[in-house]
């Protein structure tokens, strides 16, 4: 059976992979709005990884769950200023993969939240769930905008 710390280590590794995935997507995206979206998502996933590192260190030191801290993420979509683009299917494939990865991450955090009796731990995992669901929503909105409207809806 996987311990709580082992499960958090697995989640941390997933966040690290997600950060690299988004960083690679940013490097391969020609559109500045898409590049910015992927860069911001890479930073958010790196922040999640760092928070999980703090959590692992705190739990291993017998100090319990640390506070998550910081204000909730604010991700804005500005359709009024969106540029029309003609993107290849590769970007849509990347967004589809990212949507699924965000869904999977939220589910992993739900399982971690359910597996702890510590209210502080549940609070941290609930916050991570909400952030992953926000990422999923932004990506779904972007997928819709590209496929149905022909533009990047990601704003500055």
Image: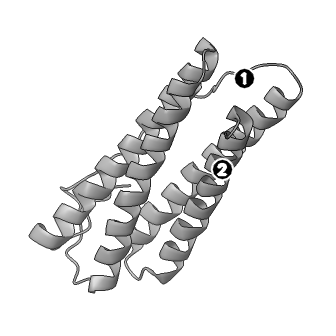
Q: Which mark is residue 66?
A: 1
Can you say whether 99 is above or below 90 in the image? above
Q: Name the residue at 43% across, 58% down.
A: 101
Check the picture and name the quadrant holding the C terminus: bottom left
Give the x, y percent position of residue 104.
43, 51
Distance between the alpha carbons at the discs numbered 2 and 1: 18 Å
Q: Secondary structure at mark 2?
A: helix
Locate residue 37, reporting x and y percent.
42, 61
Circle nearer the N terminus (2, 1): 2
Residue occupying the point 62% across, 22% down: 121
Residue 38: image location, x then y, percent: 46, 64
Binning the other alpha carbons within 10 Å of mark 1 as few (below 14), some (14 to 19) or many (20 upward) gives some
Q: Residue 118: which quarter of the image?
A: top right
Place of residue 108 in the rendered image (x, y in percent of width and height, measured from the top left): 50, 42
Residue 152 vs 76, above or below: the answer is below
Which residue is rendered at x = 75% and y = 42% of the image?
53
Which residue corresponds to mark 2? 10
Based on the displayed image, in which of its 4 quarters is residue 139 positioned?
bottom left
Tell me the residue at 53%/79% (across/down).
27
């Amino acid at each position: 059976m996987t311990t709580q710390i082992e499960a958090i280590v697995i989640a941390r590794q997933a966040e690290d992979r997600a950060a690299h995935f988004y960083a690679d997507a940013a490097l391969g995206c020609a559109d500045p709005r898409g590049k910015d979206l992927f860069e911001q998502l890479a930073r958010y996933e790196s922040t999640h990884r760092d928070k999980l590192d703090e959590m692992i260190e705190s739990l291993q030191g017998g100090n319990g769950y640390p506070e998550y801290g910081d204000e909730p993420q604010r991700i804005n979509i500005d359709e009024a200023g969106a540029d029309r683009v003609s993107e290849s299917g590769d970007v849509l494939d990347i967004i589809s993969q990212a949507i699924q990865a965000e869904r999977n991450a939220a589910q992993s955090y739900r399982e971690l939240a359910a597996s702890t009796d510590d209210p502080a731990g549940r609070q941290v995992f609930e916050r991570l769930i909400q952030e992953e669901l926000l990422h999923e929503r932004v990506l779904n909105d972007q997928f819709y905008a590209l496929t149905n409207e022909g533009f990047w809806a990601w704003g500055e």
